[in-house]
Amino acid sequence: MAHKLFVALIVIVLAGMTLPSHGQVTSNVLERTLLIKVASESGTAFTIEVDDRQYIITAKHVVNTLPDEADSTIQILKKTGWFPLKVKIFKCAAPVDIAVLVPPKQITVNFPLEPTSVGLAVGQDAYFVGFPYGLHFAKTYNSLPSIYGFVKKATVAQLDSMPESSMQRILLDGYNNPGFSGSPMVWRDSGKPDGALKIAGVIVSYESYVSPVLDKLEIRENQITDEDRAQNRVLHASDGQIYRLRDTGRLVQLNTGIATAWDIGSAVNLIHKHPIGPKVTNTFTGIEASIQSPVPC
C-alpha cells in the first residue's frame, strides 16, 4: 500500500511540472524577452550577456527616434506595470537593423543563453518570441504572474552572408507580424549534447510583395474565357454564383511569409566596442526591485 501511494505521489508531482523538451522554448528565452515602448510605439527586445555583462537588444527601427550613443528613456512592461528605464543606445551601422541598449542595472534573469549562429543550417527549426501588435497577456507560472511573449515557429530558409562586412541576414519560412521587431530568433544546436537553445539573430522585418486589388463582376458559366482561366480570375461562390475578378488599378502590400533576421554577431561586435553593460549576478529578483516605480498603463 505504501509503495502504491509513493508511485501515485510521483505521478501527481510529474503531472504538475513543466518538463523541458526539444519542442519547447524554455524560460531562458521567455524570461529575457521584453515588451518595450518608445513614445507611443511598442516593440520587442531581449537581453543577452557578453563577458558577464548584460545588454538589451532590439531592432534599430524600434528606437529610431532616439539618438545614437546617447542616454534616453524607454518603458518596459513587467508584471506590475510599465517601468521607465534609462538606457544608453548604440546602433549598428547600415544596413544592419540592430540596436544595443545598455541598462544601468541587470533587468532580467541571466540563465545561460549563448548569442551565436555558428552551426546554424538551412532547413532546421527556429523560433522567435515577441509581442505582435503589442499584444500581451498575464500568465501565471510558479504562482507568480508573468508577461511572456508569443512564440512563433519557423524554418531557416536561407542564409544571406556578407563576408566582406562580417554581416549576415537569416531568412525564415515563418510569418512575422508588426510588433515582433526586435524579437530573439533562437535555435537548437543539435551538435551539442544538451541541445540547448541559442540566439542566432534579431527579427526585424518580413519580405513583402505587391498584389493588385480586385473586384467582382457577376457572370454566367458560358461567359468564362480562356484568359479568365489562365489568369485564375474566376471565383465560384458557395451560393453557386460565378464572378470574374477584375483589376481595379489599386495595389496592396502583402506578407510573403518570409521573416528576416539580422545575425546576432553584429550586436556582439558592437558590444565589444562598448563593453559597459552592468555586471550580472545569479540573485536577480525582478525588474521591479531594480528600477523606478511603474507608470500608469
Image: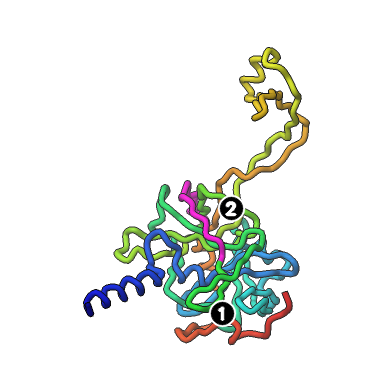
Q: Amino acid at mark 1?
A: Ile
Query: Disc 2 marks which residue?
Result: 176
Residue 271 at least partly seen: no
Task: Report the quarter where the N terminus lies.
Answer: bottom left
Query: In the rendering, at what x and y percent does residue 118 appear?
Result: 40, 60
Q: Farthest residue toward the front?
A: 1
Q: Amino acid at mark 2?
A: Asn
Q: Which residues are magenta?
A: 149-166
| 163 versus 70 height, above or below | above
Q: Quadrant of residue 191?
A: bottom left
Name which residue lies at 68% across and 81% down: 294
Q: Residues within 10 Å of mark 1 (few under 14, many from 20)?
A: many
Query: In the rendering, at what x and y percent does residue 175 appear?
Result: 56, 50
Query: Disc 1 marks which residue?
Result: 107
Q: Farthest residue toward the right?
A: 249
Magenta stretch prevailing secondary structure:
strand
Does the magenta portion include 234?
no
Query: In the rendering, at what x and y percent does residue 188 appear?
Result: 39, 60
In this image, 32 relative to 41: left or right? left
| 281 versus 129 height, above or below | below
Name which residue lies at 43% across and 69% down: 114
